Amino acid sequence: LTEPGAGSDALGSMATRAVRDGDDYVITGRKMFISNGPVADVILLYAKTAPDLGPKGISAFVVETDTPGFQVAQKLNKMGWRGCPTGELVFDGMRVPAANRLGAENAGVGVVMSGLDIERAFLCLPSIGAAQRCLDLSLDHAALRRQFGRPIGSFQMIQSHLAEMATLIEAARLTAYGALAACDAMQHGEGGRGTIHRLCAQSVMFGADMLARVTDLAVQIHGGSGFIWETEVNRHYRNARIASLGGGTTEVRKLIIAEELFRERGLSLR
């Protein structure tokens, strides 16, 4: 979905084109920051089939990466999430059978929105897992690390950090459960708008904010060792930064939440 010039405005600013040619589409363009793009066998690709229609002129395609014209332009060197290869993909006159189109022509936005809220709801779960791991590591460290003749966990400031971490994690867990329950009850066509849209945005936004705070406190509790690249809490700290960017930035999530709150009260800002 994401392109070099189309991030938060991925649908409106999309430049990748798919032109119908007989029984095929000829696709030309680039995609950026694609998770597992360098190693994928199959990708789900969005391209404009009717540029004059803007976001309403986008179609979705299932593409095998051994298709002529497909190329991994570069594998990106990231500060975190290094176990998930991320890259830039290039499509140079790539011919894809029309049978590979997912849904009707120019109906790609519906495909995006049908899964975007579910994706956002699930994005909170890795944040919760990483935060819980940081809390567990910090508890063990606070019990074993001794300064001034006593475990550092006996000091009130360390206890305050641990209490804050645990409370934030539990709050994020409950927020995620609410969003996931809404996804479980979602009917076809309900994604991308309404209360479920708000709940999923809230879940991933709060999860990202929570993870940033918890990993920061974990590094603080570990002291100098937390600043060392090879330590586990340092890895979680670096990984946490993507949580406020991937799947939509925190700023976009806040816009979604506010817009849906006004809509739920029947208020218009137009």
Image (tube, rainbow, N blue to C red):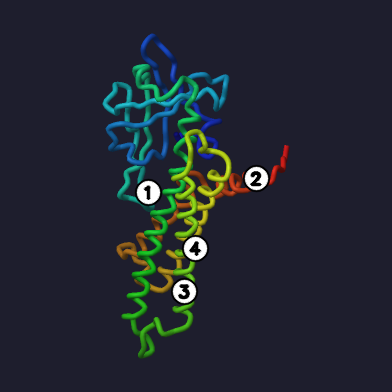
Per the model, the C-alpha gap separating discs 3 and 2 is 35 Å
Residue wearing tag 1? 78
Q: Position of residue 110 (x, y in %)?
A: 49, 30
Residue wearing tag 2? 264
Mark nearer the viewer, 3 or 2: 2
- Which numbered disc, 1 or 4, marks the residue that appears first in the sequence? 1
Is residue 142 found left or right of 41 in the rendered image? Answer: right
Type of amino acid under label 2: Glu
Q: Position of residue 132 (x, y in %)?
A: 38, 64
- Which numbered disc, 3 or 4, marks the residue that appears first in the sequence? 3
- Which numbered disc, 2 or 4, marks the residue that appears first in the sequence? 4
Question: Can residue 191 be seen here?
Answer: yes
Q: Which mark is residue 171?
A: 4
Q: Position of residue 38 (x, y in %)?
A: 30, 37
Q: Nearer the viewer, residue 129 or 51?
A: 129
Mark nearer the viewer, 2 or 4: 2
3 and 2 marks in contact (CB < 8 Å): no
Can you say whether 264 is above or below 44 in the image? below
Q: Which residue sits at x=43%, y=49%?
A: 123
Question: Can residue 4 be seen here?
Answer: no
Per the model, the C-alpha gap separating discs 3 and 4 is 12 Å
Residue wearing tag 3? 163
